[in-house]
Amino acid sequence: MLLLILRHGQTEADILNVHEGRADYEMTETGHKQAKKMAQYISSKFNPNVVISSTMTRTKQTTEHIVKSLSTQVVYDQRLVEWNNGVLAGLKREEALKRYPMPPNGRPLTEAIEEGESELAFRHRVEEAIYEILEQYKDSDQILIVSHGGTISHLLNILLGYSITGGMIFPTADLGLHCIEIKEDKKIVRFLNYSLERFQ
C-alpha cells in the first residue's frame, strides 16, 4: 500500500501572519493555483482508491481540486483537523506572544492552552484516526490523506514509530506531499515534503 499525505495550500492566515490552527481560513488565489498544479501531478503519478480529508475549509478546498482529476471515493474525517490552539486561533503572532507567552520550559504535554487541546490529546486523536484508516482501507493499493502541518507531523511520527517524547518534527510546505509505502510490517519512506514549487 502507498500512503500519500498532502498538506493544504496557502491560506489567508499566511498573508495576515496570524495563528491558524482551528481558525477556519480559506485558501488564497495562490493556494488554489498550488492545489490545481498538485492535482495534475497526483493524477499523472498516482491513483488513490480513497481520499480522506480533514473537514476544515482549507483542506476541503484542496481536496475538491485533487478529486477533479480522479475517479475516487472522498471521505471527510473530523479527527484529521489541525491542533486545537484555542485562544491563539486567528490571533496576530506578535499579540499572541505578549498575551500568551510560552512557559520557559515549554508547555507540558498534558497541559492544554486555554480553550484548546493538549499535545498529548492531539497525538491520541491523530493516532486513533490513522490506525482506523489503515484497518478500514487495508485492501487499498493507495490512500491519500489531505490534512494540516501539525497533524501531518504527528501522522509521520506515528507511522515511523517515534514516541511523542522522542519524536521528530516534520515540516510540510504548502501542498507538500509525503509518500510512505507500507509493506507487510515495514514502512518504506519513498519521499517527504515533495513540493512542485521547490522542484520546478
Image (tube, helix red, strand yellow):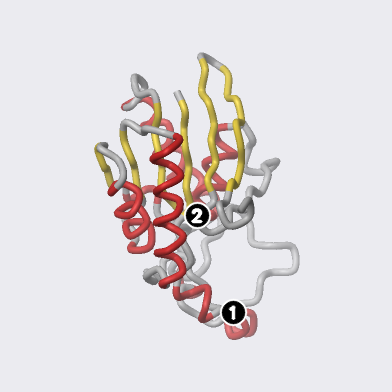
Q: Nearer the viewer, residue 71 or 143?
A: 71
What residue is drawn where x is 36% and y is 33%? Answer: 48
- Mark 2, other Cα within 10 Å: few <14 / some 14–19 / many ≥20: many
Q: Nearer the viewer, residue 99 or 148?
A: 148
Q: Nearer the viewer, residue 117 or 130?
A: 130
Which of the 4 quarters of the picture holds residue 75? top left
Q: Is residue 138 above or below residue 22?
A: above
Across and down, in percent, residue 9 comes to 46, 61
Which of the 4 quarters of the picture holds residue 47? top left
Dot 2 lies on which element?
A: loop
- Marks 1/2: CA distance? 23 Å
Across and down, in percent, residue 104 comes to 75, 68
Image depth: mark 1 or mark 2 in front: 2
Is disc 1 in contact with disc 2, using a CB cutoff of under 8 Å?
no
What residue is drawn where x is 59% and y is 46%? Answer: 194
Amino acid type, callout 2: Leu
Across and down, in percent, residue 34 comes to 46, 60
Label disc, if present, on residue 93 of the rendered structure: 1
What residue is drawn where x is 33% and y is 63%? Answer: 57
Q: Is residue 173 above or below residue 27?
A: above
Across and down, in percent, residue 35 comes to 42, 57
Which of the 4 quarters of the picture holds residue 142? top left
Q: What residue does disc 2 label?
A: 175
Give left or right: position of 77 versus 183.
left
Q: Quadrant of the N terminus?
A: top left
Tag 2 or tag 1, which sits nearer the N-term? 1
| Residue extending farthest top | 184
Amino acid type, callout 1: Arg
What residue is drawn where x is 48% and y is 53%? Answer: 7
